[in-house]
Amino acid sequence: MDLEQLKYPVGQFNMPEIFDDRQAKIWIAEIEALPEIIKKATDNLSKEQLNQAYRPEGWTLRQVVHHLPDSHMNAYIRFKQIITEDIPIIRPYYEERWAETEEAKNDDIEMSIILLKGLHQRWAAFLKTLKLEDYQRKYIHPEHGEEFTLGNMLGMYAWHGKHHLAHITNTMFQNITPNLL
C-alpha cells in the first residue's frame, strides 16, 4: 500500500453534487453510530497494537482514538456557531500538537470512547433538529480563506469518522498474510 492510501484509506472527502434530506440523514446516522463502531474495532487491541502507527511517521492507533473526540468536540462547537452566528470565522486548532500531548500518547482509550459516545449522542440530537435550509448556512475557515456550507461540514465529519476507523481497521490487519498452503 502506498503512502497516499495509508493516509486516506477511504479516499479524500468530496461533497456530492446533490445534498438533500436523505443525504443529511445518512451522514447523521453515520455520526451517531461511530462511537459504537470505534469501540468494537478497538475492544480487543493489545497495548502493542494501540502503540502501532497506522503509517510511517503517522499517529499511533491510541492517538487516533484520542484525536476523534478532540476533533469532534471542535466540530460540535463549530456547528453551534454556524447555526447561531452569521457566517462565523471558525477557530482552527493544531490537531497534530493535541495528538502529541502525554494523555493522547499514553492514556487508556476508554476515556475517549466514553467521551465520544456522549458527544456524538448530543451532536446527533442537535443535528436531527436542523432543517435542510440550515445546512446552507455558511462559515469561513481561516486556513482556506473561503466560505463553506454547514452541509459540507456535516459530510466532512461523517467522512472523518470513517477515515480514522479505516486507519484502525487497516492497521489491525496489515501484518496478517493469508496462509496459501
Image (spheres, helix red, strand yellow):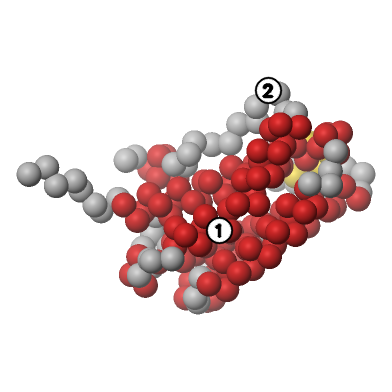
- Residue occupying image coordinates x 40% and y 45%: 6
- Location of the C terminus (image quadrant): top left
Residue 41 sits above or below residue 113 on the image: above
From the viewer's perspective, tell me whether residue 152 is left or right of residue 179: right
Say which element carries label 2: loop
Task: Classify mark 2: residues with Cα within 10 Å, few (<14), some (14-19) or many (20+).
Answer: few
- Location of the N terminus (image quadrant): top left
Disc 2 to disc 1, C-alpha distance = 30 Å
- Point out residue 102 in the picture as x, y percentages from the top left corner: 52, 76
Say which element carries label 1: helix
Question: Which residue was labeled with disc 2?
Answer: 17
- Residue occupying image coordinates x 43% and y 66%: 43
Residue 100 sits above or below residue 153 on the image: below
- Mark 2 is on which residue type? Glu
Earlier-in-chain disc, 2 versus 1: 2
From the viewer's perspective, tell me whether residue 126 is left or right of residue 15: right
State yes or no: discs 2 and 1 in contact (Cβ < 8 Å): no
Question: Which residue was labeled with disc 1?
Answer: 36
Q: Nearer the viewer, residue 178 or 105?
A: 178
Which of the two discs, 2 and 1, sits closer to the camera?
1
Q: Is residue 3 visible?
A: yes
Task: Classify mark 1: residues with Cα within 10 Å, few (<14), some (14-19) or many (20+).
Answer: some
- Point out residue 114 in the picture as x, y percentages from the top left corner: 60, 69
Q: Nearer the viewer, residue 53 or 166?
A: 166
